[in-house]
Image (cartoon, rainbow, N blue to C red):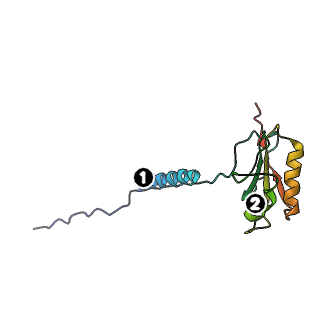
Amino acid sequence: MKVRQRLTKKARIEIIPMIDVIFFLLVFFMITSLAMTKINTVPVALPKTSSSPEAVKQDVILTVKLDGSIFINKIPVTLDTLSQQLAYAMHDNPQDTVVVNADTGSNYGLVIKVMDHARQIGVRKFALATEVENKK
C-alpha cells in the first residue's frame, strides 16, 4: 500500500492588506499633524507678492492690524508695553527672527515704530509676511 503524502501549503504573507493598513496609518498621522499645527497669528490681509518667500521659523509674530492694534502671538499689546512684552516673548531664544504681519492698509509709520521698538530690545532679524498672488 502506497501512502500518499499531503502537499503542505507554504505560508505566505499577504502584502495587499498590509499596504492598506500602512496607507491608512500614513493618512491618519498626516491629518492629525496638520490639526496640531500651532497658529500664533491674528488674521490680517497681507500684501500680495509674485514670488514665493522662503519659510521662516515662526516663534515670535508681531501683527499690526488695519485699526492700529498690535499683537504679539495673538496677545494684544500697546505701543508702550510692546518692548517689555516682546522681550518676555523672546527671552528663551533672543536670536529668533521676528515675523511682521502687517495689514495691507495699515499705517506704515506704525509698522516702522513697532520694528523700532523691537530693535531697541536687541532684535536684529525681521521677516515681512506676504501672500503669493494667484497667477491665472
Nearest-to-viewer mark from 1 and 2: 2
Question: Of the residues shown, which amino acid type is indicated by label 1?
Answer: Ile
Q: Which mark is residue 85?
A: 2
Q: Which mark is residue 16?
A: 1
Callout 2: SS? helix
Mark 1 touches mark 2? (CB < 8 Å): no
Q: From this view, report whether residue 54 is shown above or below residue 131.
A: below
Residue 118 % position (x, y): 84, 58
Q: Quadrant of residue 52?
A: top right
Q: Residue 27 carries which label?
A: none
Residue sticking out furthest to the front: 80
Residue 2 % position (x, y): 13, 67
Question: Of the residues shown, which amino acid type is indicated by label 2?
Answer: Gln
Quadrant of the snapshot with the C terminus: top right
Q: Earlier in the sequence, mark 1 or mark 2?
A: 1
Query: In the image, what residue occupies the spot 87% across and 60% down?
Result: 119
Query: In the image, what residue occupies the spot 84% across and 62% down?
Result: 123
Q: Can residue 129 be seen in this view?
A: no
Q: From this view, report whether residue 109 is shown above or below residue 93.
A: above
Callout 1: SS? helix
Q: Left or right of 131: which side holds 38?
A: left
Q: Can residue 28 be seen in this view?
A: yes
Q: Left or right of 89: which side holds 10?
A: left
Query: In the image, what residue occupies the spot 36% across and 61% down?
Result: 12
Query: In the image, what residue occupies the spot 82% across and 43% down?
Result: 51
Quadrant of the snapshot with the N terminus: bottom left
- Between the C-alphas of marks 1 and 2, the distance is 55 Å
